[in-house]
């Protein structure tokens, strides 16, 4: 399992302004931050999925479990019928598949797709994926892809969670980019 970097204190302070939705004026974005990103409830599959985690991750509330549960909530929120998983993390795939078991999953991006999970760096010159929701994992190594997706003409909202980026496309809202302290 790949180890995530620890969040330095100055980054946490810089992101504190929009913690739990503070300073977010869009009702849609506020509901998304408070109802999906910061949701504290137990979902129907968490108990079974937590059993898949290595023992040291289950015992302590470490970042990987938080991120995997967030991926579950994001996939559940998307209600995708067709999804693309462009990565190699089997735990992330298991959590996302458990959230939307009715979805048709593929390991290659084809249009139209409702949900795209991207954790591997995109090849230079490759086309940007288009979907209702795009999840860019491991922003430390995929920052260029996340920034390119933010600038895409179809992008309406973006959420930078330090380790994870969320892009929403095709919404009839004002364009906004949020930095959220997760």
Image (cartoon, helix red, strand yellow):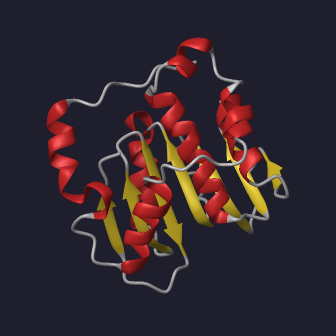
Question: Is residue 88 in sight in this rendering?
Answer: no
How far from the left and from the top, in percent, is residue 166? 47, 56
Say whether residue 27 is left or right of residue 8.
right
**Residue closer to the observer: 44 or 7:** 44
Q: State the quadrant of the N terminus.
A: top right
Question: Is residue 174 in sight in this rendering?
Answer: yes
**Residue closer to the observer: 97 or 53:** 53
Say whether residue 145 is left or right of residue 86.
left
**Residue closer to the observer: 179 or 107:** 179
Q: Residue at x 36, y 25 (%)?
A: 5
Q: Residue at x 73, y 64 (%)?
A: 80
How far from the left and from the top, in percent, is residue 73? 59, 52
Report which quarter residue 17 is drawn in: bottom left
Total numbered badges shown on the rendered structure:
0
**Residue closer to the observer: 99 or 151:** 99
Vertically, is 150 above or below 55? Answer: below
Vertically, is 41 above or below 53? Answer: below
Q: Point out the residue furthest to the top here.
A: 56
Q: Point out the residue furthest to the bottom here.
A: 172
How far from the left and from the top, in percent, is residue 115? 66, 59
Q: Residue at x 24, y 59 (%)?
A: 18
How far from the left and from the top, in percent, is residue 182? 35, 45
């Amino acid at each position: 399992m790949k180890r995530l970097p620890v969040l330095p204190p100055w980054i946490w302070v810089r992101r504190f302004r929009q913690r739990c939705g503070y300073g977010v004026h869009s009702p849609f974005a506020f509901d998304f931050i408070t109802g999906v990103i910061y949701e504290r409830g137990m979902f129907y599959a968490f108990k079974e999925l937590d059993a898949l985690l290595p023992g040291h991750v289950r015992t302590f509330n470490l970042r990987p479990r938080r991120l995997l549960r967030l991926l579950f909530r994001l996939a559940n929120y998307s209600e995708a019928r067709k999804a693309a998983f462009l990565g190699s993390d089997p735990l992330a795939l298991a959590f996302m598949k458990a959230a939307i078991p009715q979805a048709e999953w593929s390991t290659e991006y084809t249009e139209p797709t409702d949900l795209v999970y991207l954790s591997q760096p995109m090849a230079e010159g490759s086309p940007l994926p288009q979907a209702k929701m795009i999840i860019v994992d491991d922003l430390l190594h995929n920052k260029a892809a996340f920034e390119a997706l933010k600038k895409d003409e179809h992008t309406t909202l973006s959420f930078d969670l330090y380790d994870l980026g969320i892009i929403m496309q095709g919404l009839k809202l004002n364009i906004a980019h949020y930095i959220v302290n997760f």
